[in-house]
Image (tube, rainbow, N blue to C red):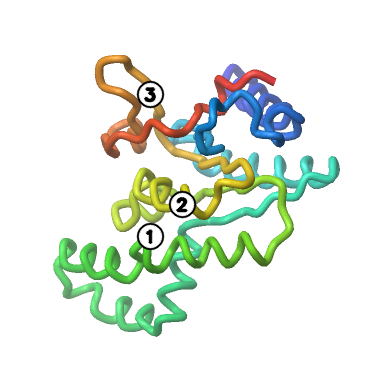
Amino acid sequence: MNQQLDRRARAEHLFKVVSGERFLAKEGLGNEVPFFICPFGAEDGLAMVEDRKDLIARLGHEGIRVLDVDLYDLSLEILAERDVLDQLIEVEPETDKSELKEMLQGVLDPQDHLIPKIGDRIAATAHEVIFLSGVGEVYPFLRSHNVLNNLQSTAKDKPTVLFFPGNYTHALATGASLDLFGLLHDDKYYRAFNIMNYEV
C-alpha cells in the first residue's frame, strides 16, 4: 500500500511541477540549463513507463505538449538507418561483449549521431517540455551524463526531464552523481536539478 501511495505522490508532484508556470518559464534555475532528473527505483521501471505515459496524457489535456524521446527506441532507429542493426544482431552471439560495446558506442556516439537526431525531433515537433527515457536499456552503450553534456547546446530552450532508474545525489564533498540502478556510479553530472525537490 505504501508503495502505491509513494507512486501516486510522485505522479502528482510531477504533474504539478511540469504543468506549473514557474517550471515552463524556467524560473529559479540561476541561469543553468533547464535539465531535470526524475530518479526512481530500478524496481519501479515498468510502473514508471505507465506513469510517464499517464503524465503525458494529463499534460496534453492541459495543453502542454511533450516531446517524448525514448533513448532505446531512438538508438534502434539510428542502427537501422545506418544499416548496422541486422549485422549487429548477426555477429552478437560470437562477438566479445567489450568489442560489441565499443562498436555500439561508435555508431551511437552522442555528439555525432544521437544528439543531431534529437535536435531534428526538437525542430520538427511542437512542444513545451522534453522527456527522455530508456536510460537503463541503453546502458552501457550510452551514459546519461554523456547524453546530457552533449544535449546542453541543443535542448536549452525548453525544460528537459530525464527519467533515471537510480539515484541522483548531491554532496558538498563529491559534487553530484548519477548512480544507475542505485549501484553503478555514472560519473559526475551537476548541471541538472532533481525534479522531486523542485517547488511548485
Image disc number at residue 110: 1
Alpha carbons under labels 3 and 2: distance apart: 21 Å
Alpha carbons under labels 1 and 2: distance apart: 8 Å
Q: Nearer the viewer, residue 175 or 90?
A: 175
Q: Secondary structure at mark 2?
A: helix
Image disc number at residue 151: 2
Q: Quadrant of the C terminus?
A: top right
Q: Secondary structure at mark 1?
A: helix
Amino acid found under the numbered disc labelled 3: Thr
* Residue depicted at 46% across the width and 39% down the height: 164
Amino acid found under the numbered disc labelled 1: Pro
Q: Are marks 1 and 2 in contact (CB under 8 Å)?
A: yes
Q: Nearer the viewer, residue 165 or 146?
A: 146
Alpha carbons under labels 3 and 1: distance apart: 24 Å
Above-or-below relation of 78 to 140: below
Pinpoint residue 61: horizontal percent, then vertical percent. 85, 44
